[in-house]
Image (cartoon, rainbow, N blue to C red):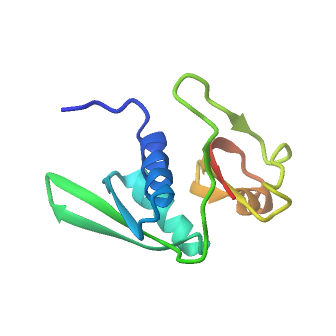
Amino acid sequence: MTFVTDPIGDLLTRMRNAQAVRKESCIAPWSKIKLELCELLVKEEWLQAVEVTGTEPKLSLKITFHPEKKLRLRRVSRPGRRVYSSSADLRPVLRDYGIAILTTSEGLLTDASARKRKIGGEVLCTIS
């Protein structure tokens, strides 16, 4: 049994590695925040689909990549160094071609919607 200290970083690494070997999808352990993050990426059209598979004690996420998009995923806030940002300090990622995912008091939000709602939070990762 392995113990992961950074589950979001593990999810992003699994996605990066699967895309590096040109797989259509990848499997990751399930958690509420990972599912919410993947659903946000599907809504923003960075991923094609995400589904929960398996039985109750061992649930998994099957993440299907968008066929035309190569994701560049970068973890910003890590367990050893948390990065927080106010809505005024949030800058567009790659001149608005990319997004940043924040965890806020209203759940996970993209940087654009956090700026619009004037809410800050912890910057989890950037996608471009």
Determine the image quadrant of residue 59: bottom left
**In the foreground, 107 or 33:** 33
Which residue ends up furthest to the front in the rendered image? 21
x and y, in percent, of residue 10 in the image: 42, 42
x and y, in percent, of residue 125 in the image: 62, 47
Q: Residue at x 60, y 77 (%)?
A: 68
Determine whether, in the image, residue 29 is placed left or right of residue 97.
Answer: left
How many tags in the picture?
A: 0
Q: Quadrant of the C terminus?
A: bottom right
Q: Residue at x 76, y 62 (%)?
A: 112
x and y, in percent, of residue 60 in the image: 26, 58
x and y, in percent, of residue 121 in the image: 66, 43
Q: Quadrant of the N terminus?
A: top left
Q: Residue at x 49, y 49 (%)?
A: 12
**In the foreground, 103 or 80:** 80
Which residue ends up furthest to the top in the rendered image? 80
Q: Residue at x 55, y 66 (%)?
A: 41
**In the foreground, 112 or 52:** 52
- 122 over 119 or under it: above or below: above
Determine whether, in the image, residue 19 is placed left or right of residue 118.
Answer: left
Determine the image quadrant of residue 93: bottom right
